[in-house]
Amino acid sequence: MVSWTGHILPVAVTIMTWFFATGLVAWLDNRERRTFPRSLLLAAIAAIGGIVLVGWSMHRATLTGAYVSLAGAILIWAWHEISFLTGIVTGPRRESCPPGARGLARFYYAVAAMAWHEIGLALSALGLIWMSRDAPNQVGAMAFTLLLGMRLSTKLAIFLGVPNLSTDILPPQLGYLKSYFGPRRLGAELYLAIAGCVALAGWLGSLALAAPSGSAEAAAASLLFALATLGALEHLFLALPFRDGMLWGWALPTRRATSGTN
């Protein structure tokens, strides 16, 4: 049975957190470069707070513990996103893909363009998993790992080529990454990625519905279900004529002002 505390509220909170956190990161990373050091410092403090929140909540298998653990994971994830999108932590290669690169060579260049960022995410996921390995509340570790898996799937799909390559929230300092995008096409790999996200969301949703109504277990599964559903939606956006600026145009004041003068 669907309940407010166990199912509806966790899903609503996850969607709102995803929407406003993405917008905040986009706003910070599209500001003037002189603001980046302060943004990175604040994000680092928030990430440390996120680690504290995950550590505090992992021994509390309660409704509050589930929300706090998710919040901690999002704060840590946000620091990685801000450090990447400001161009501070990307990879050893900081230039466009060579025009003639094909196959494995192109894949190597693409990996080199963002290797440090991906390694940092993987290490953080492993750290959170290790922290909460024997704890009753592992929502933070599972949420962060889920975000990492969906992000890798999205990047691989874009590298291979997708119909919609909307880059409204990609900041100017990372413009060279567009050269690593694949051709505009709808391949089997995108279908598989969408199907995988939908299947995962369905499984998590079944766990949420099977848990006692209004319980912490239901809320935890619902939070993860919402993340997986958002991941499926982001993959679906790659196949549809959808521009991310439609959702986060409010977070890009400079571009909005510029477009208004054209």
Image (spheres, rainbow, N blue to C red):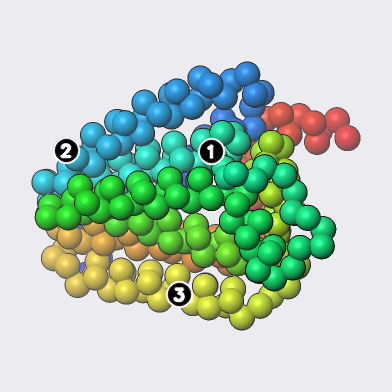
Disc 3 from disc 2: Cα separation: 32 Å
Residue designated by label 1: 89
Which picture quadrant has residue 7? bottom left
Say which of marks 2 and 1 sits in front: 1
Please determine whether, in this image, residue 130 is positioned above or below residue 211: above
Residue designated by label 3: 196
Residue designated by label 2: 56
Count how many numbered circles sit on residues in the image.
3
Say which of marks 3 and 1 sits in front: 1
Which x, y percent locates residue 4?
A: 25, 56
Lower sequence index among marks 3 and 2: 2
Amino acid residing under circle 1: Val
Amino acid residing under circle 2: Trp
Q: Tags 3 and 2 in contact by the CB under 8 Å rule?
A: no
Lower sequence index among marks 3 and 1: 1
Q: Residue at x 31, y 31 (%)?
A: 48
Secondary structure of residue under mark 2: helix
Residue projecting furthest to the bottom:
188
The residue closer to the viewer here, 119 or 179, is 119
Secondary structure of residue under mark 1: loop
Please determine whether, in this image, residue 1 is positioned above or below residue 120: below
